[in-house]
Image: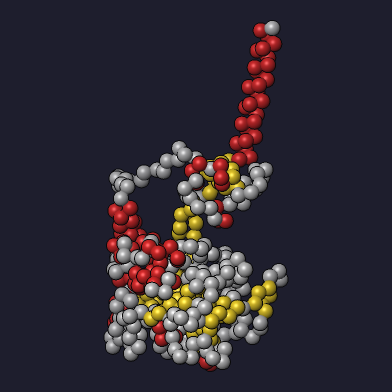
């Protein structure tokens, strides 16, 4: 009898160990160098304080887990990050972020001088919540070249400002379901509507091998005039930034080819280095003063502000401007690109994981000062969106609730 119980116990142990082996082989996952276990989001204890988004679904390591639904890579509680160096840890976010800023940009370019952590405390919380209401800045991983056609749907936040004849004259970007960001000098009496979901101007329906999309036109809110920055000066384009309130909300589920871009709302969104690629997109004039039929994209680089000050001594250049240089193929903005966004890839956190999305840090204001289509290495000025974030969050709050 004792021998029978012993054999039964041995069999149970073997079965238990086998189950553990199968579970470990099937359910163990890794994402962004963080180990975890594949499980449903609602069963993951370490992500319960993190709102669920589609980006959290693990489609790589957990595809053979046998689970169905919102399957995520659930980080383990006993995770410990290595402590490199002798830097002491602290629970004060401000101190930690300041250290990160200094390490990433040791020269402290003028771009970061005013857009510091203390400014974030002056953001309007409601306006900030409106910006963070939807997933923004989605990235399609296509290889980027300079001055080439964008992929259909690559930049779903692109907006086109139309006049009374439904002709485009400026660009812009979707930042919430109700607001568009553009240049202040684009706000004219001839502004009638804003077009979204456009790709090729000459066709009403744009199609790839698998997807077709059509543009959608929205009117301007009749009870809310476009908001121009109070410090805007038309003579020198100082603070050349504005917000347009639409006459109705954009239904991002109905129009799934339209989506907002992120705006800089945390210190890491500002830490651009000279080697980082900035992306400009728009339909502006090309060589020989011809409008681009297809949405164009190109790479640019940030330069220290004093370079532009030396090149253009008669212009008023301060922290409200960015000094931007053309990419390797000489991509520059032209007439018609005004208001179009300048953006780059930034990191954001989902629970324990780090992902990337596009964040707009500038827009076309003065544009390139020479003939369109010229190849040039001279930098030029763009509007610094981050320098106006305090105004943007407060203006969104007031305009959204009609204060």
Residue 141 placement, left or right of 64 = left
Determine which quarter of the picture holds residue 338: bottom left
- Is residue 373 in view from this perspective? no
Say which residue appears at 65% left-offset and 12% top-offset. Answer: 6
Say which residue appears at 49% left-offset and 56% top-offset. Answer: 355
In the rendered image, residue 96, in percent from the top left (x then y), is placed at 32, 53
The figure's colour scheme reads secondary structure
Question: If the image is split into quadrants, where does the N terminus sit?
Answer: top right
Residue 261 placement, left or right of 101 = right
**Rendered position, 253 above or below 225:** above
Say which residue appears at 42% left-offset and 71% top-offset. Answer: 401
Q: Nearer the viewer, residue 250 or 325?
A: 250
Residue 297 placement, left or right of 241 = right
Question: If the image is split into quadrants, where does the C terminus sit?
Answer: bottom left
Determine which quarter of the picture holds residue 398: bottom left
**Rendered position, 19 above or below 277:** above
**Rendered position, 250 above or below 55:** below
Q: Residue furthest top?
A: 1
In the rendered image, residue 253, in percent from the top left (x then y), is placed at 60, 66
Say which residue appears at 33% left-offset and 59% top-offset. Answer: 101
In the rendered image, residue 182, in percent from the top left (x then y), is placed at 45, 79
Q: Nearer the viewer, residue 342 or 133?
A: 133
- Is residue 401 in view from this perspective? yes
């Amino acid at each position: 009898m004792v021998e029978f119980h012993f054999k039964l116990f041995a069999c149970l142990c073997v079965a238990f160990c086998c189950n553990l082996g199968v579970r470990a082989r099937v359910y163990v996952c890794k994402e962004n160098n963080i180990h975890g276990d594949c499980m449903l989001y609602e069963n993951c204890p370490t992500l319960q304080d993190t709102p669920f988004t589609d980006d959290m679904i693990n489609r790589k390591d957990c595809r053979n887990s046998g689970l169905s639904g919102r399957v995520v890579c659930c980080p383990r509680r006993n995770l410990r990050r290595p402590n490199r160096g002798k830097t002491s840890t602290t629970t004060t976010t401000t101190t930690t972020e300041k250290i990160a800023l200094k390490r990433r940009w040791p020269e402290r370019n003028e771009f970061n001088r005013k857009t510091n952590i203390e400014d974030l405390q002056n953001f309007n919380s409601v306006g900030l919540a409106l910006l963070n209401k939807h997933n923004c800045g989605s990235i399609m991983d296509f290889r980027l070249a300079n001055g080439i056609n964008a992929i259909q749907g690559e930049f779903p936040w692109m907006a086109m400002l139309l006049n009374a004849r439904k002709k485009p004259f400026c660009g812009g970007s979707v930042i919430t379901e109700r607001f568009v960001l553009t240049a202040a000098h684009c706000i004219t009496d001839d502004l009638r509507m804003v077009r979204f979901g456009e790709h090729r101007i000459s066709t009403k329906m744009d199609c790839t091998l698998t997807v077709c999309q059509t543009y959608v036109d929205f009117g301007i809110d009749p009870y809310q005039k476009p908001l121009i920055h109070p410090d805007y000066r038309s003579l020198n384009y100082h603070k050349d930034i504005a917000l347009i309130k639409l006459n109705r909300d954009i239904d991002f589920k109905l129009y799934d080819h339209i989506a907002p871009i992120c705006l800089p709302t945390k210190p890491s969104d500002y830490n651009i280095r000279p080697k980082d690629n900035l992306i400009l997109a728009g339909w502006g004039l090309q060589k020989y003063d011809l409008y681009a039929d297809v949405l164009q994209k190109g790479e640019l680089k940030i330069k220290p502000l004093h370079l532009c000050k030396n090149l253009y001594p008669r212009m008023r250049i301060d922290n409200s401007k960015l000094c931007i240089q053309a990419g390797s193929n000489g991509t520059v903005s032209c007439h018609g690109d005004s208001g179009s966004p300048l953006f780059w890839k930034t990191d954001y956190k989902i629970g324990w994981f780090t992902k990337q999305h596009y964040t707009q840090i500038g827009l076309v204001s003065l544009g390139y000062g020479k003939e369109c289509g010229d190849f040039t290495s001279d930098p030029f000025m763009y509007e610094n969106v981050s320098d106006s974030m305090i105004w943007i969050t407060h203006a969104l709050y007031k305009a959204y609730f009609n204060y």
